[in-house]
Image (cartoon, helix red, strand yellow):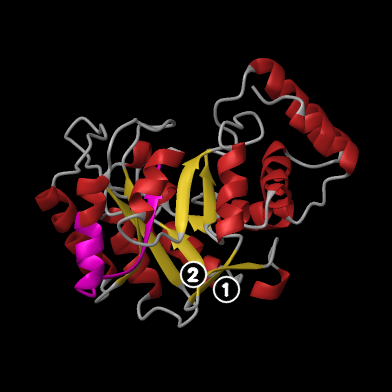
C-alpha cells in the first residue's frame, strides 16, 4: 500500500507540510491508561514500522504519553526517520503519580516539554507542536495568548517548524492566529458530537487542518444503536463507518486513530476506504446531539 491509496489522499497544511489524511495516533502504544511501558514491546515496534510501510506520513504523539515511553518507542522503531514522515506532538499537560493529566501551561513547563519531545524523539526541530489548553473533550474559555506566545518564541528560535492548537474554541483560534500562523486544530468531534461543524468549515476555507479525536467517543445508547445499524447494513464495523464519515465530512479533516495492533491498523485503513452512500450519511447526520 502506498500513500496514494490511503483513504482520503493528502492535505497540504503548508508549503513544506503535506500529510496523508489517514494518520496514526500513538497514544495507545504506552501501557495501561497510557502509563508506563507497553505489555508487548515488540508488538509496539511492529505497529510503528507498519505505519510507515503502509504509507502513512504522520504520527500524532506527545511526550506525556507514558510519560516519555511513546516517543522513545517511536525513536527506537523509526529513527533515522523516513524523509516523508512527519511527527506531530503536543504540550500543555503532564502525568502525575496517580496517572492524572494536570495542565502544564506555565512558560517553563512548556519549554521543558518541547525539549523533552526533542530529546526523546531525537530531532533538532519538531515538525508540529499542538498547544493543548482545554479539558478532555471540551475547550476551557479564556485567553491562550501567554502559553501560545511561548511556543511562537520557540518557533522563532528554530525548535518548532509549525504550530497547532488543541481543545479550543473559535475565539482562542483567532487569538492564536493574531500571534503566529497555525496549521492545525485538534478537537473532540465525531458523528454524534457536531459542536464544531461551523469551525470545521471555517478552517477548511483557510486551508487549516482539523484533526478530530475520539471518533467513537461520547455516543448515547440510541446514537450507538443507529451507528451499529448502519455498519451492519454496510457489512462493516462501527469504527469503519465513523472514520469514513469523518473523511467525507470535509477535505481538511485528518484522522489519527490509534491502536497497538498491526491487524487493527490495517483494519482502520481498510475501513476508512469505505464510501458511505447518501442514505447512510443522511441517517448518520440525524443522530447528532
**SS at badge 1:** helix
**128 up-or-down from 245: above or below:** below
Instruction: Find residue 229 and report its image quarter.
Output: top right
Question: Which numbered circle lies on residue 87?
Answer: none
Judged from the image, the secondary structure of the residue bearing numbered disc 2 is helix
Residue designated by label 1 = 53
Which is nearer the eye, 158 or 37?
Answer: 158
Q: Is residue 247 left or right of residue 234?
A: left
Q: Is residue 213 above or below residue 275?
A: above
Q: Residue furthest front?
A: 178
Q: Is residue 231 magenta?
A: no
Q: Which residue matches tag 2?
A: 49
Quarter of the picture containing the N terminus is bottom right
**Badge 1 vs badge 2, beta-carbon distance below 8 Å:** yes
Q: What's the residue at 88%, 42% (across, down)?
A: 278
Q: Which residues are magenta?
A: 150-168
The number of discs equals 2
- In the picture, residue 55 is in which quadrant? bottom right
Q: From the top left corner, tell me how far across and down residue 20 is, in percent.
A: 59, 67
Q: Measuring from the top left, give residue 51's x and y in whole percent.
A: 54, 66
**Where in the figure is residue 14, as x and y percent of width and height?**
49, 72
The residue lying at 75 percent from left, 32 percent from top is 285
- For the residues labelled 1 and 2, the Cα–Cα distance comes to 6 Å
Quarter of the image holding residue 177?
Answer: bottom left
- Residue 254 seen from this side: no
Amino acid at each position: 500500500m502506498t500513500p496514494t491509496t490511503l483513504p482520503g489522499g493528502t492535505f497540504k497544511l503548508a508549503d513544506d507540510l503535506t500529510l496523508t489524511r489517514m494518520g496514526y495516533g500513538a497514544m495507545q502504544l504506552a501501557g495501561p491508561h497510557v502509563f508506563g511501558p507497553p505489555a508487548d514491546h515488540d508488538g509496539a515496534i511492529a505497529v510503528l514500522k507498519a505505519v510507515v510501510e503502509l504509507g502513512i506520513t504522520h504520527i500524532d504523539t506527545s511526550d506525556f504519553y507514558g510519560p516519555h515511553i511513546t516517543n522513545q518507542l517511536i525513536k527506537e522503531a523509526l529513527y533515522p526517520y523516513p524523509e516523508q514522515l512527519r511527527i506531530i506532538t503536543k504540550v500543555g499537560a503532564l502525568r502525575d503519580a496517580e496517572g492524572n493529566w494536570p495542565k502544564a501551561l506555565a512558560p517553563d513547563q512548556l519549554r521543558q516539554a518541547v525539549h523533552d519531545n526533542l530529546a526523546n524523539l531525537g530531532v533538532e526541530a519538531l515538525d508540529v507542536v499542538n498547544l493543548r489548553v482545554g479539558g478532555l473533550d471540551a475547550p476551557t474559555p479564556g485567553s491562550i495568548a501567554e502559553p501560545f506566545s511561548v511556543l511562537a518564541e520557540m518557533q522563532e528560535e528554530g525548535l518548532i517548524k509549525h504550530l497547532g492548537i488543541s481543545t479550543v474554541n473559535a475565539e482562542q483560534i483567532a487569538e492564536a492566529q493574531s500571534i503566529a500562523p497555525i496549521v492545525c486544530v485538534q478537537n473532540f468531534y465525531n458523528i454524534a458530537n457536531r459542536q464544531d461543524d461551523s469551525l470545521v468549515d471555517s478552517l477548511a476555507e483557510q486551508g487549516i487542518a482539523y484533526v478530530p479525536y475520539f471518533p467513537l467517543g461520547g455516543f448515547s445508547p440510541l446514537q450507538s444503536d443507529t451507528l451499529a445499524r448502519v455498519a451492519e447494513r454496510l457489512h462493516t464495523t462501527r469504527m469503519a463507518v465513523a472514520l469514513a464519515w469523518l473523511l467525507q465530512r470535509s477535505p481538511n479533516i485528518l484522522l489519527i486513530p490509534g491502536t497497538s495492533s498491526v491487524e487493527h491498523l490495517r483494519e482502520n485503513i481498510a475501513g476508512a476506504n469505505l464510501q458511505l452512500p447518501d442514505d447512510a450519511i443522511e441517517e448518520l447526520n440525524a443522530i447528532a446531539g
